[in-house]
Image (spheres, rainbow, N blue to C red):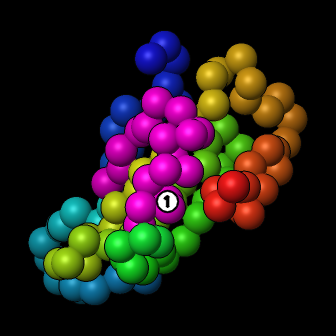
Amino acid sequence: MGSLSHEIALFANDANHREPQNEYTRLVHFAWQLKSFEDLKFFYNSLLANKIPISGIGDHGISIGVYFSDPDGNEIEVYYELPKSEWPKKEIFSGKFPLGSLNS
């Protein structure tokens, strides 16, 4: 798919992080990249149609993600990433993806 912002991102756990608070690490979040914004809209509307709660939508400037949880409470993100040529040059958040646009 060309240049991606990242393929894997690892972050340290800290005392302010969500449960469980113990010496073990765990999976907090994983994501699937979709090929198009149309695919993301289809996935979003499928979640709604199947009454799967959506915990958030994030416009990250270079991508937009839809967040939900699996039955065990693991956070899942499906996202569409803009081609690198369309990444914002100066602003962190581009506003390219109005939140309401997922329903259209």
Closest to the observer, 17 or 28: 28
The C terminus: image quadrant? bottom right
Closest to the observer, 27 or 32: 32
Which of the 4 image quarters holds residue 98?
bottom right
- In the image, is 26 to the left or to the right of 79? left
Which of the 4 image quarters holds residue 29?
bottom left
- In the image, is 42 to the left or to the right of 102? left
- In the image, is 64 to the left or to the right of 29? right
Dot 1: within a 10 Å radius of its alpha carbon, few (fewer than 14), some, or many (20 or more) residues? many
Residue 33 against residue 30 in the figure, above or below? above
Which residue is depicted at the point 86% across and 35% down?
90
Q: Main secondary structure of the magenta part?
A: helix
Q: Residue furthest top?
A: 2
Q: Residue 96 in the image: x percent, y percent?
A: 79, 44
- In the image, is 24 to the left or to the right of 33? left
The N terminus: image quadrant? top left
Q: Residue 18 in the image: x percent, y percent?
A: 35, 82
Q: Is residue 52 magenta?
A: no
Q: Residue 64 in the image: x percent, y percent?
A: 60, 49
Do we see residue 12 in this rendering? no
Reading the image, the residue beneath label 1 is 44
Q: Residue furthest right?
A: 90
Which residue is depicted at the point 22% across and 63% down?
27
Q: Which residues are magenta?
A: 30-47
Which amino acid type is marked by label 1?
Tyr
